[in-house]
Image (spheres, helix red, strand yellow):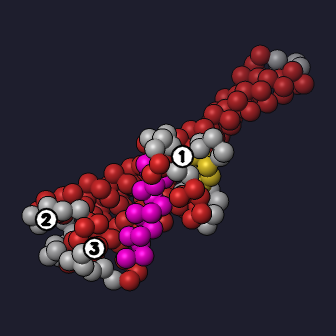
């Protein structure tokens, strides 16, 4: 399930740009037809009407894209947390992952540990910031922005509003989470990664 769920989320994320482009092309064609119908003999008026509708639709698409990517980011974090919970429940492990790593009861490979640190410090902080609207000391933007410099598609403005315009960061986080989950599942005896 670890890999199947990650692959499903990845496919949703990767299909979105094409689906959005198809929708934009369809709506653009409809706006052109509408403008020509409304102003059959006035090309300037038809063009102005088309541009007005088209501009509004493109603005809406940017908002929808941002909302989609934020939702997918949150979905990747939910996937990670719920998979950890399932793995630990089936292993009769009753402490947090942080506890087992900090007490050396569960030692991760160096690359996996780096992924774990990234997810813990940056992905979780961004998730908390999005879910809690930036309230609370632990959700301070400063904790997140230093690492986000590597991901220009994710920005946080001075008011703390997060904007995500592309999937690179989300797919990187998902890959790191999947890597962590696969190693933990293997170390706890789940050879087939079906939890």
- Magenta range is 113-128
Whether residue 125 is visible to the viewer of this picture, yes or no, is: yes
Crowd around label 2: few <14 · some 14–19 · many ≥20 (10 Å): some
- Left or right of 158? Residue 172 is left
Residue at the (40%, 63%) spot, across then down = 120
The residue that disc 3 covers is: 101
- Of the two numbered discs 1 and 3 on the same chain, state the one appearing first in sequence: 1
Residue at the (71%, 22%) spot, across then down = 34
Q: Is residue 111 above or below residue 26?
A: below
- Left or right of 97? Residue 149 is right
Q: In the orientation shown, which residue stands out farthest toward the left?
A: 92
Task: Indicate the position of residue 194 as horizontal and vertical percent values.
Answer: 19, 65
The residue that disc 2 covers is: 93
Callout 3: SS:
helix
Q: CA distance from mark 3 to mark 2?
A: 13 Å
Whether residue 72 is visible to the viewer of this picture, yes or no, is: no
Depth-wise, is mark 3 or mark 2 nearer the camera? 3
Q: CA distance from mark 1 to mark 3?
A: 41 Å
Nearer to me, 49 or 4: 4
Residue at the (56%, 52%) spot, across then down = 141
Task: Indicate the position of residue 172 as horizontal and vertical percent values.
Answer: 48, 66
In reply to whether residue 126 is colored magenta, the answer given is: yes
Which is the main secondary structure of the residues drawn in magenta?
helix
The residue that disc 1 covers is: 19
Quarter that holds the N terminus: bottom left
């Amino acid at each position: 399930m670890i890999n199947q769920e990650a692959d499903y989320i990845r496919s949703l994320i990767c299909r979105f740009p094409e689906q959005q482009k198809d929708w934009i092309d369809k709506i653009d064609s409809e706006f052109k037809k509408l403008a020509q119908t409304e102003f059959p003999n006035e090309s300037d008026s038809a063009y102005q009407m088309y541009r007005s509708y088209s501009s509004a639709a493109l603005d809406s698409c940017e908002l929808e894209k941002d909302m989609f990517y934020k939702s997918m980011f949150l979905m990747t974090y939910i996937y990670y947390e719920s998979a950890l919970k399932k793995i630990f429940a089936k292993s009769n492990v009753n402490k947090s992952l942080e506890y087992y790593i900090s007490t050396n009861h569960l030692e991760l490979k160096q690359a996996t540990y780096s992924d774990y640190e990234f997810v813990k410090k940056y992905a979780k902080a961004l998730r908390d910031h999005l879910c809690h609207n930036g309230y609370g000391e632990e959700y301070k933007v400063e904790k997140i922005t230093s690492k986000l410099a590597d991901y220009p598609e994710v920005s946080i403005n001075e008011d703390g509003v997060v904007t995500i315009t592309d999937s690179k960061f989300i797919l990187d986080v998902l890959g790191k989470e999947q890597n962590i989950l696969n190693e933990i599942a293997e170390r706890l005896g789940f050879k087939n990664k079906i939890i």
